Image (cartoon, rainbow, N blue to C red):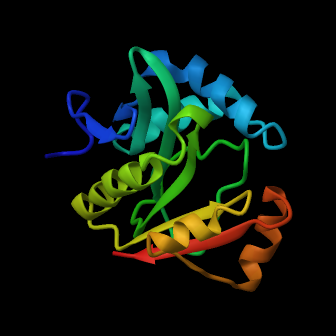
Amino acid sequence: MTASRDKDVHKAGIADWRALRATDIPEVVRIAAVLHPDFPERREVLEEKLRLFPAGCFALEKDTSLYGYALAHPWTPDDIPRLDAFLEKLPPSPTCLHLHDVAIMGPARGVGAAAAVEQVLSDVARERRLGTIALVSLYGTDRLWSRMGYRPRENAGLAEKLKDYGAGAVYMAKEL
């Protein structure tokens, strides 16, 4: 099953992951504002991620309501895109899938939704021969990501960019 097709549905506890649509963006913006009030991103920045790499963008839906979203795009390892900044284009020879955000509202937490979309995104990365998935863990979620095989990675270049993500931000990666 190809993860990027809109008709594909991936079960995740009380809701299902499906391909994100442009019409979902207002709800993505609302969820982002609720879950990430200290890290606001403009609607246009989120729309650009969907436009540049729709195969890495998913919505967590139940009965036509969104409970979360995931945004990922090809990138280079050990690099972090700035928050609320346009990518403009994807790297010409990416080797990494960057998980920009996985945001899940309270009712859908704790039922396997993050693990389900991580599996879908791992499949997306493998299909494109991207050998690494990387992310910035916030809010102490590094324990969750560690259980899925992600490990902290540190270097001097990352330290400065991680400051934008607040105290406790951890850059993590998983080799596929």
Q: Tell me, yes or no, if residue 7 can be seen here.
A: yes
Residue 113 lies in quadrant:
top left
Nearer to us in this view, 163 or 148: 148
Q: Position of residue 38 (x, y in %)?
A: 84, 42
Q: Is residue 139 left or right of residue 133?
A: right
Q: Tell me, yes or no, if residue 105 can be seen here.
A: no
Quarter of the image where the C terminus is located:
bottom left
Q: Position of residue 57 (x, y in %)?
A: 43, 39
Compared to 61, does 116 lie above or below? below
Residue 28 lies in quadrant:
top right
Q: Position of residue 51 (x, y in %)?
A: 45, 32
User: Which residue is rendered at x = 41% and y = 60% of the image?
Assistant: 92
User: Which residue is rendered at x = 61% and y = 36% of the image?
Assistant: 106
Residue lying farthest bottom? 155
User: Which residue is rendered at x = 26% and y = 29% of the image?
Assistant: 6
Residue 54 lies in quadrant:
top left
User: Which residue is rendered at x = 71% and y = 58% of the image?
Assistant: 138
Compared to 49, does 160 lie above or below? below
Q: Is residue 35 left or right of residue 106?
A: right
Q: Position of residue 142 (x, y in %)?
A: 63, 68
Q: Count the labels in the image.
A: 0
Q: Is residue 84 left or right of residue 123?
A: right
Compared to 24, does 36 lie above or below? below
